[in-house]
Amino acid sequence: MARKLVNLILLTAAYLSLAFFVYYAINPLCYSFFQHPAFVVTTDFFYSKIGAIGGLSDYLQTFIDQFTMFRFWGTFMLVAELLLTAFLVSRYVRKTMGENRYAGFLVWLLPVAVAFVAWSDIKYSFAINMQVLLLAAVLNLHQALSKYDWNKFVTPLLAIAIYHTCGPVALYAFAVCIIIDFAFNRDKSKIISVVGAVVVAAVWPLLVYKFMLPVKPNAAFYDMRPQEQMFVSFKLTPALYMLYVCLPASMLIGYAYRRISGGKKSLLITIAAVTVLAGCTVASQLKHDNRVERIGFKMEVAAYNKDWNQIIKYVKKNKWLTEVGNYERNVNFFYDMALAETNQLADKMFSYPQILGVEGLFLDRPTATNVCFPVSMFYYNAGFITSALHFAFEAQTTYNNSHYIMQMVIDCLIIIGDYNSALLFLKKYRDTMFSKKYYIDRMSYIDGGFITEFEKQNINEIRQNHPKRDFYISGQQNNMLQLLLANRKNKIADQYLTCSALLQNDLELFIDLITEGYSNVNYNSLPRAYQEAVILYRALNKDVKEGIEKYNIQPYIEDQMVAFQQLVKTHPSNIYEIVKTRFANTYWKYYFFDSPKITGASIK
Amino acid sequence: MKNIIYILLGLSALVSCTESYDGIEVNYKPSIYPDYTDIVIPVNIAPLNFRASGSCELLSIDIIAGSDKYNLQCRNGKAIWKENKWRSMLSEHVGDTMFITVTMADTIGQIVKCAPFFQVVSSDSIDSYIAYRLINTGYVLWDKMGIYERCLENFKQKPIIENKSVDLACMNCHSFSAQNPNTMLLHIRKFNGGTAILYDGKLQKYNTKTNISMSAGVYPSWNPNGYLIAMSTNFINQKFHNNYGKRIYVSDSKSDIVLLNMKTQTLTTCPQLSTKNLENLPSWAPDGRTLYYICAPDRNNENEFDEGYWYSLLRITYDEATNSWGTVDTVLRANDLGGSITFPKVSPDGRYIAFTFAERGYFTPFNREADIQLLDLKTNEITTPEGVNSGSAESNHGWSHNGHWLVVGSKWPDGLFTKPYFAHFDGNGNFSKRFLLPQEDPDFYDDFTLNYNNTDFITGEVPTTPIQWRDAIKADPIPVKADPSVDIDALSGATQKADKN
């Protein structure tokens, strides 16, 4: 009794530890800006999932994926899945490799490996996807091997079921497992089952490709990712392949050992097999770890939450981010956005390498799926609602059920005043258990209710400040200029417009912008990058524009400029190394060395 | 056991019995969604299920047709017909007017009996299928899309081809010869590019770009003979407006018209259709000899928003036997109308042309002011049929095989998503009030956020499978030959090579 109680306490403790790990280590990556189909309520959706290859696991992962935008429920679901996986894997391990009662506990290594993968792979929802596929795989293999023991006719049918729930690679793994089992046990009564499974593995994908579904060859023959959402688990594919390779491999090791040791089962060999399995999973994933990209996603989450200080803190805390070799366009974009939102863009922009110039400041071009939502967020915050809506629609073409994107579409439509269309999207929330608060709030706003959360965003001010006159949305600078013309107080537009001139090395335009007075910002006290640009302009031009002399340049910057000029005159061979050390965050360094005009850098 | 059967029978009798409501009779017609009031419907249309608009709740429907009376009890506030009952009701009353009285609970829960509305059952049957593309509201990007066919006699929709099987390629401009599902064309862009054509029982992909055409074929029109396809060749741009009402403007910097002969797989054109002006959107007349198209001046004088940039309606004759073209005849001058004429579609009897009239340009699905107009070629009279148009953009229309039905893509009522509407045409220039494509669940359109794009009638099911389309699209394209007798420089418009030299 006492022993059982201890076991129970140990298990609970293990569960809680895992939950804490997931809750704190993985969050805020629980949020993903990709697919969150919260609307798994229609029969069409159900059929389209089940009809596809790997559709059942796809359906399950899609359903479970809904929880990922809720921190607590996401954690709960992931940990519950980890436990279930551990339980099933332990049964599988004990069946094929050893009856030792401790063997089951060893397979904890596998869920821990998966948790690690989730942490390293940026997207929590991907981990869920993997979990479901893994669960389905293990469950199917376990069931199939059990049935294989007693019914030769069921085996081919199970093989087909595996194909449609987990995809082709799971089917091949299953066939291999059965061949291994037959090879070691030589039970002739099972020959029909074995042949049946092998024939299914060889022929079924071909039949499906040729006659059943209009699918691409990779979906039918070798891709294990669900057919409907090819982008999910993309990064986890190697880990999943590894799993399917490792399962029959571990089985092979188990049987081989038993054959050599005369039927004796060993705990050691079980430990070895499971360790190899978990180790391979982690190793394959490590290869794909990208910490810069992970920071980019964290920044995206923070930008969505308007936590600008957090974004700045990421760059401050992770100095390696500012190394040229670690340059990431998304990090550049979000960092610049955070600086502009906190009114520091012109002061601190060059503390991050602006390698792509204007293309790092804006993310519009080229219009690609993964940039549309960040761009939409940017324009929304800048008060350019028609563009925010345009990019939200573009994002929605791929992620058509994403909460984040749909809410952006709805909010933009309401601000623009197209309530009819807003209602079309809003009604999708009517039948779902999620985001009720959002639904009620926006419905209340549309119905003319009292102060709602939405109204607190100064909706009317955004409407008033939106450009009234019509123009073609062409080029980011023009967009910013139009915003500024509509509202001279628009600090975001002002900073982006002026800084884009700096990033283009266009000093004439920069001087025009600060002297013409498009915005009502008091330029008698210039931010640092502007002072550096003004002094550079004076140094490069004999005839300077009238009015430029009124700007005060701090003595410290003047002294630095003198030093910089002397360095340029002497031009030592290691000039760039010196500039990097002594003039690290200056506009001059950018202007003469880092600008795409000098380096020729462009978007890959 | 017997007792159980009796109980079940008794219960079913209770459930199926007609419930009568004593409502207050009111003198206004009900507001229902979709709006199926006072319309002409084809005898073979699927049930027109509906519900009350707003927060009213339908209770029952009473129909008087000729000497017959029908009653429908509504469940969950929806009038949903069983298909066989609906079908027999319509077939028994061809040519009759059905008077429909709706009993409903109004916004305050009071039961009211509304004034009857009517539906005329026309003996002019509608083509049994429509084909369309379903797509998101993206303007630059796309993901999943497909070309689908929907039976108008029931609610069944089937994919002709979905792009998930062809690397998510963009596909559109599906087109049929005289509504015949056996001859079909479909353009594929970005991945696996080309034009897949179902002709003479074979489905193959072609490359229609030649040295006499500036691009591959774009907007197509099949000749009724089933083997000549007129196509425009275009350099297309799109621009985005800050004004949400206008949203997007699609225009061409250049365009011409070419003709593909599927028998010889040869592409031809003539100087009249390859001028420096912008020839576009060809449309064959049913005689198979006259080609209508639109044309605008070259773009040297464009202003910021193309205001006053209008297309006129022209025509030219073509003699296939001699491969010769006639002279160009201006049918409608844009300046006379004060707007742009686009998407001309000639009625199957050849007497009328339904076209879209807009304030500028030719690609009008986003032009809120765009309306369908009707030109009577006999009298040269132009009318704007009220029942066909709305306050939103109307565009992408098509005639049924018998010329008695017009399908119109309209962004009404939300202004964002295009949906197909149908209107009856009496053959004398009069359209009835249009009605929305019926769906089994009247709530269907409430949260349907895809566009029905380029809806067109077909007389039956397309006799292919999605797998056949996939295999054809995945195959290498067959290049079409350029007509050696044509001496045109594709990029410089009508400038013939000889002239240029």
Image (tube, coloured by chain):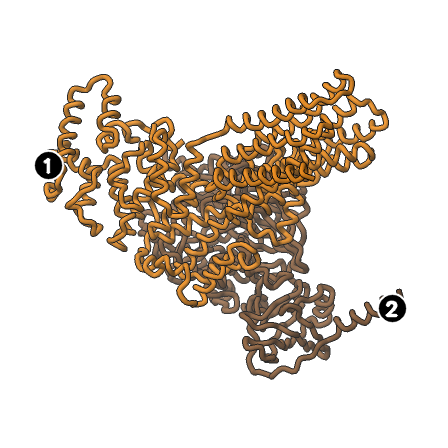
Task: Determine the image quadrant of residue A418.
Answer: bottom left
- Viewer can see residue A406: yes
**Relative to B266, residue A430 above or below:** below
Same subunit: marks 1 and 2: no
Task: Determine the image quadrant of residue B332.
Answer: bottom left
Spatial CA distance of label 1 from label 2 is 108 Å
Q: Quadrant of the N terminus of chain A?
A: top right
| Amino acid, disc 1 | Asp
Q: Is residue A407 left or right of residue A256?
A: left
- Chain B shade in the render: brown
**Relative to B223, residue B484 above or below:** above
Q: Give the label on residue B3, or none.
A: 2
Q: Quadrant of the C terminus of chain A?
A: top left
- Residue at the spot of label 1: A543
Q: Is residue B24 left or right of residue B249?
A: right
Mark 1, other Cα within 10 Å: few <14 / some 14–19 / many ≥20: few
- Viewer can see residue B329: no
Image x and y of residue B135, in percent: 53, 50
- Which chain is disc 1 placed on? A
- Which chain is disc 2 placed on? B
**Relative to A344, residue B124 above or below:** below
Which chain is orange in the rendering? A
